[in-house]
Image: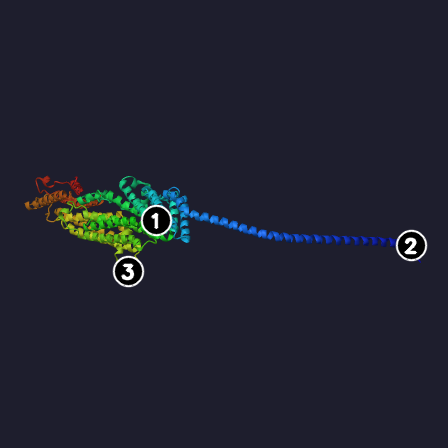
């Protein structure tokens, strides 16, 4: 059993907790009631607020819509006013731009173009919105005026600032220093940069808005004139400075290395061991000699003008590419270069015509002027072809036509020269009295030597006339063989003609000396130049052939001394013993031999002293051989007659000691002796 006290305590504890719980429950109920009251009050407030919001919304929305409509109306009014201002501005464009248009674009191109743009917009507006309005005609007229002034400014800028390129700059551009490892291209500035930009700007506007291509015609006309003037200025520079700056300037010297021109013709004459060769001193040649320097300058000038044209044309195309629309560039360039190109081709045709006239009068040396020009034209042709890409066929064909013309006339000159060597008439008055080298020989060799500078060109000339299939695609070796054959042909014709000319001499000895001198001159000339190697390409024995001819003529000459030495032979000399008295007839035989020898020696020495053997080596060899033959025979004759008493006056017959005979022979071929 639980004690009574404990139960009472427990009961009181439970009753206290119950009382506390009841108090808590009462508090909660009170709180819930207050919360319900607050909730009802809040609901009432919210309902009232909602009601008021709905009332406010019903009041504000119409106001908002009305305000929005008012704003839209305001915007429409603003836009309308703006459009009105914009439209009204079109009606004032003509007046607003009048001053600027009248004053033109000079010095204020950007402002002028902006003004033109306003006029253009006005034109577009009236065309779209009011095509019948008088304002359209006004702004159209103003636009056309503005375009005309732009075209005039385009022309003015081009004409004012387009200047011929100075000759020195051209020479620098086509020259260059070959000693420099890196060569810098010389840039040709045709127009100041600021001016160029204005011209480009005007061109772009005229293409896009002007709808007019007339300015392209203006461009090529102005630039064509400047191109032609630049080349003519270079030509005039050569003419004025022919003896000084044009020839000695570094640019020209450098160019000469690239495109060597015709060397000044060497005049055949006394050249060390070839003294005695007859000079080309007739009147016709003398007149030509005075023109050689001038002719060289003209050739040099033309060659440089060809190079200048290529360089300037390339520069013009680069300039044109910045100004002219791409699809018009080729046509405009073709028109631009025509005048300068035609003038160069005309000058080339004149050179061909002059060569043709020279052939008619048999002045073949004049034809040599086309060789350096033709060589340079062919060297320059690849650059020509690249530069003229896209031009008309007639333009591209001008240079090839000139080259063909020059090759044809050159080949004709070569062939007619060979024929002239063969058919040169045998004129007695034109034959050298001393048997020296004939003018025909020196002329022929000189002509052939000058061909050496243009071997490839001359070979190509000959090849161009070949009708065989191999000629259609001839190689350098083929043309070299043709030239070798040609030179051999000329030498053969020359040899044949010399043989005929030699017949003019009545004295066989002089005939032999003449042929010897000419053959020796030919051989020495061949050996001193590359001619011998060139001929050897097709005829390897030409050198030995000439040596045989020379030796043969020496032998022919030596026969002239037989009439002297035949008196020294033992034939008809009587047999005798020392101290034996000779008969009158026998004494007379010995006297006649002495007299025949003396008279023959004197006669030959007198005659042959006036003859010439220009080659010292040959001259000494002929003298030495003749001295040996005559001296040996004379000494033997004197020894046989030493103990013979055939006259009371031996000094009358024995006039010459052997030493004196040798001295007399040493004076042969020496007019100063």
> Is 34 located above or below residue 195 in the figure?
below
Q: How far apart are marks 1 and 2 (CA)?
A: 132 Å
Q: Is residue 623 above or below residue 481?
A: above
Q: Do the residues labelled 1 and 3 touch (CB within 8 Å)?
A: no
Residue 423 in view (yes/no): yes
Sequence-first tag of 3 and 2:
2
Q: Residue 469 — which label?
A: 3
| Dot 3: element | helix
Mark 1 or mark 3, which has the lower sequence index?
1
Is residue 507 at least partly visible in the picture? no
Disc 1 and disc 2 in contact, CB within 8 angstroms: no
Which residue appears farthest toward the bottom when viewing the image? 469
Is 423 left, or right, of 308 in this rendering?
Answer: left
Q: Residues within 10 Å of mark 3 (few under 14, many from 20)?
A: few
The image's colour scheme reads: rainbow
Residue assigned mark 1 = 215
- Residue 173 figure quarter: top left
Which of 301/446 is in front?
Answer: 301
At numbered mark 2, what does the secondary structure look like: helix, strand or loop? helix
- Residue nearest the observer in this picture, 545 or 504: 504
Given residues 55 and 160, the one toward you in this image is 55
How much space separates mark 1 and mark 3, taking CA atoms?
A: 51 Å
Task: Give the spatial CA distance, label 3 vs label 2.
Answer: 154 Å
């Amino acid at each position: 059993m639980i004690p009574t006290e404990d139960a009472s305590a427990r009961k009181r504890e439970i009753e206290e907790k119950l009382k506390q719980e009841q108090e808590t429950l009462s508090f909660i109920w009170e709180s819930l009631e207050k919360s319900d009251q607050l909730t009802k009050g809040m609901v009432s407030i919210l309902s009232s607020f909602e009601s008021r919001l709905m009332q406010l919304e019903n009041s504000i929305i119409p106001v908002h819509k009305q305000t929005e409509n008012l704003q839209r109306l305001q915007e429409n009014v603003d836009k309308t006013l703006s459009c009105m201002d914009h439209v009204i501005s079109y009606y004032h464009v003509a007046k607003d731009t009048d001053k600027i248009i009248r004053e033109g674009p000079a010095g204020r191109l950007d402002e002028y173009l902006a003004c033109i743009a306003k006029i253009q917009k006005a034109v577009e507006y009236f065309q779209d919105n009011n095509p019948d309005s008088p304002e359209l005609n006004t702004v159209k007229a103003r636009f056309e005026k503005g375009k005309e002034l732009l075209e005039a400014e385009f022309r003015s800028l081009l004409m004012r600032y387009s200047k011929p390129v100075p000759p020195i700059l051209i020479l620098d551009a086509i020259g260059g220093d070959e000693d420099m490892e890196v060569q810098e291209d010389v840039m040709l500035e045709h127009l100041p940069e600021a001016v160029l930009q204005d011209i480009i700007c005007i061109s772009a506007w005229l293409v896009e808005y002007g709808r007019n291509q007339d300015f392209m015609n203006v461009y090529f006309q102005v630039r064509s004139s400047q191109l032609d003037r630049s080349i003519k200025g270079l030509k005039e520079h050569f003419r004025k400075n022919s003896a000084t700056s044009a020839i000695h300037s570094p640019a020209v010297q450098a160019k000469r290395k690239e495109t060597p021109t015709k060397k000044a013709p060497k005049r055949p004459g006394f050249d060390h061991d070839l003294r005695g060769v007859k000079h080309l001193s007739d009147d016709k040649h003398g007149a030509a000699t005075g023109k050689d320097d001038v002719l060289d300058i003209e050739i040099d000038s033309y060659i440089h003008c060809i190079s200048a044209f290529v360089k300037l044309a390339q520069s013009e195309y680069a300039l044109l590419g910045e100004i002219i629309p791409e699809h018009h560039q080729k046509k405009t360039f073709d028109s631009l270069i025509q005048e300068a190109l035609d003038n160069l081709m005309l000058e080339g045709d004149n050179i061909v015509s002059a060569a043709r006239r020279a052939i008619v009068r048999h002045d073949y040396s004049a034809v040599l002027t086309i060789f350096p020009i033709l060589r340079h034209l062919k060297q320059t042709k690849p650059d020509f072809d690249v530069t003229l890409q896209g031009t008309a066929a007639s333009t591209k064909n001008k240079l090839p036509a000139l080259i063909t013309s020059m090759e044809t006339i050159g080949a004709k000159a070569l062939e007619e020269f060979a024929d002239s060597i063969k058919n040169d008439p045998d004129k007695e008055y034109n034959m050298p009295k001393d048997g020296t080298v004939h003018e025909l020989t020196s002329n022929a060799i000189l002509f052939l030597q000058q061909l050496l500078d243009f071997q490839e060109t001359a070979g190509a000339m000959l090849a161009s006339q070949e009708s065989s299939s191999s000629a259609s695609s001839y190689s350098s070796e083929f043309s070299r063989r043709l030239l070798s054959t040609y030179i051999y042909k000329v030498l053969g014709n020359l040899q044949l003609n010399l043989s005929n000319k030699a017949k003019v001499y009545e004295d066989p000895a002089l005939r032999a000396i003449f042929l010897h001198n000419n053959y020796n001159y030919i051989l020495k000339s061949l050996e001193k130049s590359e001619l011998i190697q060139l001929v050897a390409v097709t005829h390897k024995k030409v050198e030995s052939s000439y040596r045989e001819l020379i030796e043969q003529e020496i032998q022919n000459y030596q026969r002239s001394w037989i009439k002297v030495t035949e008196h020294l032979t033992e034939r008809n000399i009587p047999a005798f013993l020392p101290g034996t008295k000779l008969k009158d007839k026998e004494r007379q035989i010995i006297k006649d031999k002495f007299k025949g020898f003396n008279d023959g020696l004197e006669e030959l020495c007198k005659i042959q002293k006036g003859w010439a053997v220009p080659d010292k080596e040959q001259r000494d060899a002929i003298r030495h051989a003749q001295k040996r033959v005559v001296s040996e025979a004379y000494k033997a004759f004197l020894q046989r007659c030493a103990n013979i008493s055939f006259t009371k006056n031996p000094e009358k017959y024995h006039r010459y000691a052997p030493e004196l005979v040798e001295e007399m022979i040493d004076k042969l071929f020496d007019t100063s002796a």
